[in-house]
Image (tube, rainbow, N blue to C red):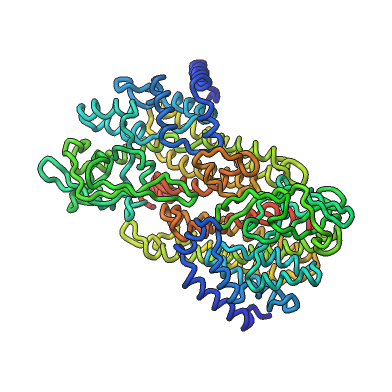
Amino acid sequence: MNFELTEERQMLQDSLRRFLADRYTTEVRNGIIGSDQGFSAEIWAQLSELGVVGALFTEEQGGFGGAGFDITTVFEELGRAGVVEPFLDTAVLGGGLIAALGNAEQQALVERVIAGDLQLGFAHSEPGGRYDLSRVTTTLTEEDGTLTLSGRKAVVVNAEAAEMLVVSARESGEAGDADGISLVLVPRDAPGVSLRGYPLLAGGRAAEVDLDQVRLPATARLGAAGAAFPAIVERAAAASVALAAETLGAMEAATELTRGYLLTRQQFGRPIGTFQVLQHRMADLWIELEQARSATINVAGHLADEARMRDRHVAAARNLIGRAGRMVAEDTIQMHGGIAMTQEYELAHLAKRIVMADHRFGDTDYHLEQFIALSV
Amino acid sequence: MDLSYSAEELAFRDEVRRFLDEKLPQDMSDAVREGRSLGKEGHDRWHAILNEQGWLAPNWPREFGGCEWNAVQRHIFEEECCRAHAPRVVPFGLTMLAPVLQKFGSKTQQDHYLPRILSGEDWWCQGYSEPGAGSDLASLKTKAVREGDHYVVNGQKTWTTLGQHANWIFCLVRTNPEAKQQEGISFLLIDMDTPGVEVRPIILLDGTHEVNEVWFTDVRVPVENLVGEENRGWTYAKYLLTHERTNIAGVGFSQAGLDAVKRMARAEMSGGRPLIENPHFAARLAKAEIDLMAMSTTNLRIISRAASGQAPGVESSMLKVKGTIIRQEINDLARRAAGLYAMPFASEAVEGGNEPPIGPEGAEQVSPQYFNNRKLSIFGGSNEIQRNIIAKVKLGGGA
């Protein structure tokens, strides 16, 4: 039994924490959120150089990590600093899917991701599909070696900045079937691809992606026809590990800020942290924080397990962290009072990151249902 | 015990419904239902429509041009306005300042300010909270020093709602720094155009500009703008706070919010079926509705008692706490219902643009509203302060 980080991960955590504390201040970050692009190419390059992207891929894939605890090490730090750059979308999802399914030629794209000079997006969810991973209705047909892609994808994070989109589409079966789903690599500027971009509430940008008879060569397919679903579920699990860790990091930062505020804010002639009602609320938050930490460790440690065991831990962690996250976001704002309602205060952003993370790859309720389904 | 409205009350309700059917502009109710901001112009328009009807001031005595409705009538009116998605009337002049002027103001002040509130000529804002005086309001530091015929005001107010539209502000200021905290405060009316008054916007976490900081630097205020007696302002402020706490339960808002969640959950599909049929979601929705049904009866019990002349006591604190918990839970359910589409931030929708919505109808507003309504349990006496009041009343000296 050993719950310590390895030396390499500890070093990555230290350097990442130092870098973000120095460079990724509230002011810098709020400037990035307000920018047209929604993320900083400079920060992206610097973090890639620090090894943030490489840590998310295995040695075989050209990286130096790729396991559950590598993902949690990176994303916990990104979460603490409220980082809005799309590491989840470009690296864990887009890059991760290419690494899992791509042929030798396609694998070359992973090198570019690790080097920090390729942006990707994962166009999977569809309007009306909610969080069901198999509810894919976008169609892919093949005729004389040419693929035709048609459909609509919802809230595709980082779509505008992405050079390529990894798009899921159905070659056979019906919405809800696991079989028949393929993945294709689509240049964002391919004819027939149109985007309606918008900012996200917690920072970053996304787009509605319309695919109107997009013509692609058969070589655009990632892996075998109609057989991509297991890889999609595996990457969704990895994304859940990242989101759990990111939320944990943001919860840590939020409770730290609140601790500091309770010790300094004076009302009724004394620091408000001397009021027992607030002390007990803080105590409850710290209890939940440790629960969230353990849930994150559980899911990271089971990411490489067989699917059912892995997905049961995914559901458990996301449900617990969804609940604890909501409690931390709401209670830390409440204990601060009005100041935490202002856009320029760090906690406002952290609270948004925590709550909005619950809308990616299944929310608290969805994961409760998943857990029940996987437990009977 | 009779849970239904009397024949007269039902007739009154029908009259209110007819008025709203005829006079509430469609574009306005659409904007309110979709959670879009109306801007100053929109508020002014609705204000003028109500004024023309003579229904702008439900709580004012007739001698001042009000309706003098009792608590049940006011409740019916508010309920119907919420149901019809009428805009909220800006309360600072009408329901906060006016009762203070009517009770403690001079005849000259009443004759001057009250008609201007009704006509919409003056837009008032509230200068209470300060950076260092939130829950502990009595520790406020903005000071007013008497110099001849003027007070000279220096200090800073904050969380001034819609102060960017206001031309007047009513303020609590410290006139006696030597006295016990509550006994050195005065209630002062300040023209925002006076040199030395500066309004600075505060942008909230949902990107909206609804509150401000107001700074006072050597602002000269004529002594006739003092309300009542010097150093008695705290008494007037407490009187005002009891008026701020009418409709504190927000039953109408919760009901409208619940209806909106149901609309969205009927349209949104989950696992191939409408979300509203999802047992887990349906259970949460049902709990919120059950809580709301009970709370609206608590609300009516208190209103009914108020209509028969009894002052609301600790129950208004209970309503504030329960009412805000229910509203915030409904906001959370709305966010859940929107699924993925809770994430986009459509700032143009907040400001009133013409773009088609991203995602299902109403989804764009759920997350901004969820975050914005964190304020409900903070302002107007935080829920912690309300619980202190409840505990003190119920436990007496032991608390």
Residue B263 visible in the current orientation: yes
Spot the residue most to the right: A144
Residue A161 horizontal/vertical position (percent):
62, 59
Q: Which residue shows up at 89% across the image and 55% down it?
A: A144
**Across the whole image, how many numbered discs are drawn on residues?**
0
The one nearer the camera, B237 or A41, is A41
Q: Is residue B390 left or right of residue B288?
A: left
Q: Is residue B139 left or right of residue A284?
A: left
Residue A216 horizontal/vertical position (percent):
79, 56
Spot the residue most to the left: B148
The one nearer the camera, A362 or A295, is A362
Q: Is residue B295 above or below residue A228?
A: above
Residue B178 horizontal/vertical position (percent):
17, 53
In which quarter of the view is residue A339 placed? bottom left
The one nearer the camera, A242 or B280, is A242
Spot the residue most to the bottom: A7
Q: Which residue shows up at 73% across the image and 59% down it?
A: A166
Q: Which residue shows up at 46% across the image and 66% down it?
A: A25
The one nearer the camera, B34 or B347, is B347
Residue B6 visible in the current orientation: no
Q: Is residue A334 above or below residue A60?
A: above
Q: Is residue B28 above or below residue B135?
A: above
In which quarter of the view is residue B84 placed? top right
In which quarter of the view is residue B245 placed? top left
Q: Is residue B395 left or right of residue A3?
A: left
Residue A304 horizontal/vertical position (percent):
76, 71
Q: Which residue shows up at 75% across the image and 69% down it?
A: A99
